[in-house]
Image (cartoon, grey):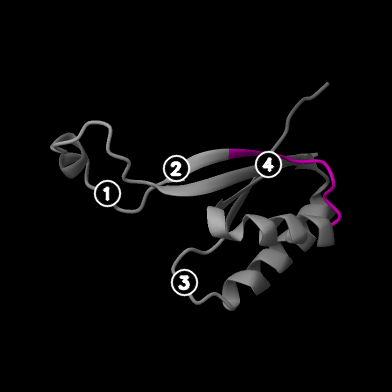
């Protein structure tokens, strides 16, 4: 068993759900997150408006699943990213699970 994490900008949420379905990953969770790219901490610290939101609305998907399904997921994510017209590719990582109940 492995843990797969996928991040996507909010605009691609429906596409990620389709990708998970094609990869036969039926059990997963998601959470809304703010994504940032190369934002210098000095600029953030000197913001005139402390409540100002500088990030992009994104979604984090995660699933505990079998390696074989993750391999298929990565193929589908790679195919999706090859046809993007934006600079916001889907990102994915896999973490091993040593123990679980």
Picture disc at residue 62: 4
Quadrant of the image occupied by residue 12: bottom right
| CA separation in Å, label 1 and label 4 | 25 Å
Mark 3 touching mark 2, by CB under 8 A? no
What residue is pinned by disc 2? Answer: 34
What residue is pinned by disc 3? Answer: 86
Say what secondary structure mark 4 lies in.
strand
Mark 4 touching mark 3, by CB under 8 A? no
* Mark positioned earlier in the residue sequence (3 or 2): 2
Say what secondary structure mark 2 lies in.
strand
| CA separation in Å, label 4 and label 2 | 16 Å
At 37% from the left and 48% from the top, the residue drawn is 36
Q: Is residue 28 magenta?
A: yes
Task: Categorize mark 4 by other alpha carbons within 10 Å: few (<14), some (14-19), many (20+).
Answer: some
| CA separation in Å, label 3 and label 2 | 18 Å
| Front disc: 2 or 1 | 2
| Front disc: 4 or 2 | 2
| Front disc: 4 or 3 | 3
* Mark positioned earlier in the residue sequence (2 or 1): 2
Q: Which residues are magenta?
A: 24-31
| Front disc: 3 or 1 | 3
Position above or below: 49 against 13: above
- Residue 54 or residue 19, whichever sits in front: 54
């Amino acid at each position: 068993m492995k843990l797969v994490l996928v991040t996507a900008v909010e605009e691609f949420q429906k596409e990620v759900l389709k990708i998970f379905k094609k990869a036969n990953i039926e059990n997963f969770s998601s959470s809304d997150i703010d994504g940032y790219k190369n934002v210098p901490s000095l600029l953030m610290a000197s913001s005139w408006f402390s409540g100002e939101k500088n990030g992009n609305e994104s979604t984090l998907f995660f699933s505990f699943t079998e390696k074989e399904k993750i391999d298929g997921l990565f193929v589908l994510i790679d195919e999706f990213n090859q046809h993007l017209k934006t600079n916001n590719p889907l990102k994915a990582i896999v973490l091993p699970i040593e123990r679980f109940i």
